């Protein structure tokens, strides 16, 4: 059976009511969890089959990574959270039961390939801070003292310096700890240095990494 976290569970409903106090019917965040590689198809299915009045946005969050090859730099786009499709709604019960009526979605539910999970408000706010309007977590510009100590940062990492677990400057990314769906996750966020700027090469197509 599909996992329906938050809906129908009194403790979760109480948590929802506590953080929407003072707000009138706000859009809450949920995750539609599916198999890795099916994220875009699931988002397209929702956008095509679900009435617009039942949700605000349905999207996949991507991130930019710097890829270096033969002294040239390319920006590669990857899924930030493989298997996760994000959706906002102020009618989650109606949304879920509508999803169950979509034949393709019903099959996913029967095959246990689908979960509908609640995203805490602080988790959603953090994601909104680090991604842009296209739901992409861009590269962060960074300067160090040459010995590994960070001196300057701009971009998504500005808001989460205290969450950095490990810096891999040679690979142009840092490992960041964040909380999502009530659990800690480690995510690689891309960085770029001044010396990388002159070696940038436009990426043909969208640069999307299917892996």
Image (cartoon, helix red, strand yellow):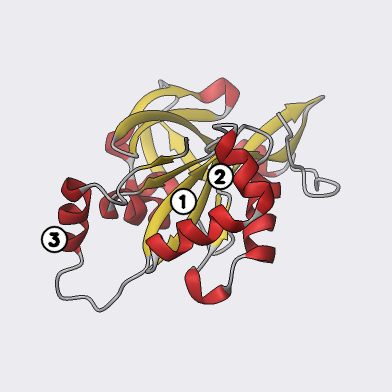
Question: Separation of disc 1 and disc 2 at Cα?
Answer: 7 Å
Q: Is residue 172 visible?
A: yes
Q: Is residue 63 left or right of residue 44?
A: left
> Mark 2 or mark 3, which is nearer the start of the sequence?
3
189 or 58, nearer to the observer: 58
Label 1 close to label 2 by CB (< 8 Å): yes
Task: Residue 112: give its label.
Answer: none
Picture layout, residue 90 above or below residue 202: below
Q: Is residue 206 left or right of residue 103?
A: right
Q: Which residue corresponds to mark 3?
A: 18
Q: Which corner quadrant holds the C terminus?
A: top right
108 or 38, nearer to the observer: 108
Q: Position of residue 13 (x, y in %)?
A: 21, 55
Q: Which residue corresponds to mark 2?
A: 139
70 or 41, nearer to the observer: 41
For image coordinates 22% across by 49% down, the residue present is 12
Disc 3 on helix, strand or loop? Answer: helix
Question: Separation of disc 3 and disc 1 at Cα?
Answer: 32 Å
For image coordinates 41% across by 44% down, the residue present is 157
Q: Which residue corresponds to mark 1?
A: 155
């Amino acid at each position: 059976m599909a996992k329906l976290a938050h809906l129908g569970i009194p403790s979760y409903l109480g948590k929802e009511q506590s953080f929407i106090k003072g707000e009138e019917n706000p859009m809450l965040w949920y995750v539609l969890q599916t198999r890795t590689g099916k994220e875009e198809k699931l988002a397209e299915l929702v956008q095509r089959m679900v009435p617009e009045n039942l949700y605000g946005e349905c999207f996949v969050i991507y991130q930019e990574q710097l890829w270096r090859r033969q002294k040239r730099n390319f920006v590669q786009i990857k899924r930030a959270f493989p298997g996760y499709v994000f959706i906002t709604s102020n009618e989650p019960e109606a949304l879920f039961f509508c999803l169950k009526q979509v034949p393709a979605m019903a099959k996913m539910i029967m095959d246990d390939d689908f979960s509908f999970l609640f995203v805490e408000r602080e988790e959603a706010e953090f994601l909104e801070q680090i991604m842009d309007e296209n739901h992409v977590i861009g590269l962060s510009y960074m300067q160090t003292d040459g010995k590994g100590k960070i001196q300057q940062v701009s971009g998504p990492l500005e808001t989460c310096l205290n969450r950095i677990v490990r810096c891999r400057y040679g690979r142009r990314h840092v490992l960041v700890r964040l909380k999502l769906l009530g659990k800690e996750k480690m995510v690689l966020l891309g960085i770029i240095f001044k010396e990388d700027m002159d070696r940038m090469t436009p990426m043909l197509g969208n640069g999307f990494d299917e892996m």
